[in-house]
Amino acid sequence: MEAEITMQIILIKPTQNVVFGLQKGAGNNYETVQKQISTSDDLTFTFSIKVKGDRSKDELPKLSGTFVQGPADSKFVYIDIGTYAGQTDTHWSRRLKIPLTGITWKEIDSLHGDSLLQTIVPGTGRDGGPNCATVKPFAGWYTK
């Protein structure tokens, strides 16, 4: 089985006047897409990933695509922040790691029509700057 599903990340109240964007590609060969400068509103990033696997052999679906990063057992998506997102007039240089762990065949099977998998994460860290590193605690993905 191979399919493409839509994912959506909502950053709640990210640090203002900072550029946030979705990382497409990996290593030195990546670009930041869907760049948005934060105001007082939440930011939304919508993208597609590939789902592969055989339900009879694979306990969990195999996730891949241009937005997916990391080893097979701990896939994630990056949100680039500040200079990592191409902003030149900031001192912020961060990345936010959104785990793709916990996505099961049950979540994949719950998608119908225009539904998608969504997660909501805080956009501001404890230091008042943009949230960065791996989201903790991570509430997971749910069908929207």
Image (spheres, rainbow, N blue to C red):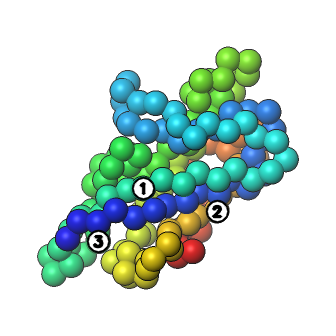
Packing grade of label 2 (10 A; few <14, some 14-19, many >=20) is some
Proximity of marks 2 and 1: CB atoms separated by less than 8 Å: no
Proximity of marks 1 and 3: CB atoms separated by less than 8 Å: no
Proximity of marks 2 and 3: CB atoms separated by less than 8 Å: no
The disc, 2 or 1, on the residue closer to the chain's N-terminal end is 1
Q: Which residue is mark 1?
A: 48
The answer to whether residue 135 shows anywhere in this view is no
The answer to whether residue 36 shows anywhere in this view is yes
Q: Is 62 on the left or on the right of 79, as rendered?
A: left
Amino acid type at mark 3: Leu
Numbered tag placed on residue 126 in the rendering? none
| Quarter of the picture holding the C terminus | bottom right
Where is residue 51? Give x, y as percent: 30, 63
Q: Spatial distance from mark 2 to mark 1, Cα to Cα?
A: 17 Å
Amino acid type at mark 2: Ile
Where is residue 100? Give x, y as percent: 43, 59
Mark 1 or 3: in front is 1
For image coordinates 43% across by 51% down, the residue present is 76
Q: Which residue is mark 3?
A: 60
Helix, strand, or loop for circle 3? loop
Q: Is 54 on the left or on the right of 78, as rendered?
A: left
Q: Spatial distance from mark 1 to mark 3, Cα to Cα?
A: 18 Å
Numbered tag placed on residue 120 in the rendering? 2
Q: Spatial distance from mark 2 to mark 3, Cα to Cα?
A: 22 Å
Where is residue 1? Give x, y as percent: 20, 70
Residue 3 location, quadrant: bottom left
For image coordinates 33% across by 49% down, the residue present is 65
